[in-house]
Image (spheres, coloured by chain):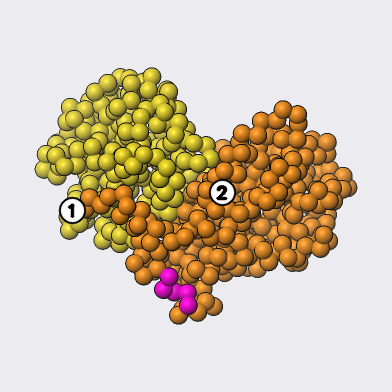
Amino acid sequence: MNRNRRETLKAIGAAAVAISSELPSASVAAEDSPAMQKASLPGGEGLPSGWRAMRKYDVHNHVMEALHEPGADWSQTEDLVEAAEKLGIDMLCCSRPITGGKQAGNSEVRDVNNSVLAAMKRYPERIAGFCFIQPGNGPAALDEIDRCLEGGMIGVKLYNQFKYSDPIVFPVAERCIAHGIPLLGHSGHVTDARTQAAQPQISDSHDFCMLSGRYPELSLILGHVNGGGDWEWAIKALRDCPNVYVDTSGSVLENNTIEMCVQELGHERVLFATDLTMEGCVGKILSAALTPSQREDIFWRNFQKILERRRT
Amino acid sequence: MIIDINAFLGHYPFRQLHFRNAAKMVELMDHNGIDRALVSSLNAVFYRDAHRGNQELIEDIHAHSSRFIPVATVNPKYAGWQHDLEEAVVSWKVKAVTLVPAHHGYSLVDAYGQAALESIADYGLPVVLTQRFEDRRQRHHWDIAEDFEIKTLLQVAQAHPQLRFLLINWIGLDGPSLAEAGLKGRCLIDFARLHVLLRKDVAKLIAALGVEAIAFGSHMPFDYVGPSLVKLADLESLPEADYEKIAWRNAATFLRIDD
């Protein structure tokens, strides 16, 4: 029983699979060739071999500081990039949203987006930008989208200022469609009174479905399916909304989340993300019962297809 | 070798868990390279008579005794709990005792909690305190248990200087505060909810409490095991002796599992 460290590392490095007998019958997508895909994990211990080298695009992450200001403290961003390097995360899609439901004016919005632009400039190979928008700013919000895209950003991020079923969000969706860029939304079907009181305008799957139903051509991403809230509810409520993607980020690491996403939505609607839970969110994709092809799609290829829709 | 100190068997009433019996959990452990797991009964958390859950746990793991290290769950508000605790310690050789005051309706600082902590200390066993089973933001309507508060932990640590603490599934622990409460050398913390790389939670706790305070934990079967395997892999840069302490040796020493 007393395996040494070398043996332990070997076990962890060996190919792995979750246990199929415990999983929903449809958890592995049928489109993959069983002969090519199924048997990646014959021994079944630990993490898949070469997991650090697997390409990974993290579609939901953040920079936290005012990086565009003189004398800015870059330490958290440096730690973020260092963690991404160690975990083999090739691209970090970062935004800096204004939280707490604050109806921030456009100058404040520009300020946080300038932080992201500064991070993109310092780490052009690692950090991609998502432009935070406060929909209540009207035409100025749309101008801000254009400004961010001119600076090289690749998507739009909404927080909890308005539910996404609110018509005030519609022009933002239309501008995203015009540019062919994804719209990533903070989400949660929260069931505790404290969080409900703190985030009265948080959107859940029903709000995403309503927006997606109105704009089926929109690349709409439900943010952090494991970010706090009833994730089983969130996934089931997306069954009939085929144009909504989910990102896998969040501090909740509960078993079967990824498998349920794949079973109910299809693996091509699932996008890898961490939202600052770096090791946890890499680990749950590695642990989930996925074929190598499904894992690769979730880690990066599904998002790559979204990026290829951009017009600017 | 890996010993997982954050694992449970049995049903959780608010969400379906896979791998909830010993045979299935052994499969999960084998697939993840985990040699042994410290387990307590989830049924014992929710039964009125927690000891029935302990009995089920002992029966369940009997055929896999080399893989599991049993923990008894005690409800100090229930009739005959001292007798039940004695049976668990003397007859079943449990290596730790867990208390779930939020679920059993008392506080660690009231008379029930104090009595339980004193009895556990008298047996020379560590007490297991799980900060939470799942995130409150997704809770079922009937799930009203609050997370363990750090101030309560610090209070009871100072009040019971002989007692050792196994801290399961915690986040937000401040190493210097734990040290000031006298917990250096008498606590073991699993990293299931801690960050290794980004916030350097583990490094900060090691700086304050020593590497002997940290152990592998996954929170299975609630959570995926992969996240903790990734964290362990991220600790490969430590000296080999320290890495092995975190992977298994600290757990073996703290739980005295070869005694």
Q: Residue at the location (20% across, 57% down)?
A: B64
Q: What secondary structure do most residues of the magenta stretch adopt?
A: helix
Q: Residue at the location (37% across, 27% down)?
A: B209
Label 1–label 2 contact, CB within 8 A: no
Which residue has dot 2 on it?
A85
- For discs 1 and 2, the disc positioned in front in the rendered view: 2
Residue B88: image location, x then y, percent? 16, 41
The span from disc 1 to disc 2 (Cα, nearest Å) is: 41 Å
Colour applied to chain A: orange
Instruction: Label 2: state its secondary structure.
Output: helix
Residue A79 or residue A186, whichever sits in front: A79
Please check the rendered image and state whether residue A72 is part of the magenta-colored stretch, yes or no: no
The mark found on residue A232 in the picture is none
The quadrant in which the C terminus of chain A is found is bottom right
The letter of the yellow chain is: B
Q: Residue type at mark 1: give it.
A: Ser
Residue A301 or residue A201, whichever sits in front: A301
Q: Residue type at mark 2: give it.
A: Glu
Query: Is B74 placed above or below A299 here?
Result: above
Number of residues whose C-alpha sits closer than 10 Å to that of mark 2, classed few (under 14), some (14–19) or many (20 or more) = some
Residue A186 shows up from this direction: no
Which residue has dot 1 on it?
B65
Residue range of the region highlighted in magenta in the rendering: A36-40
Horizontal side, residue B90 vs residue A229: left or right: left
Q: How many marks?
A: 2
Number of residues whose C-alpha sits closer than 10 Å to that of mark 1, classed few (under 14), some (14–19) or many (20 or more) = some
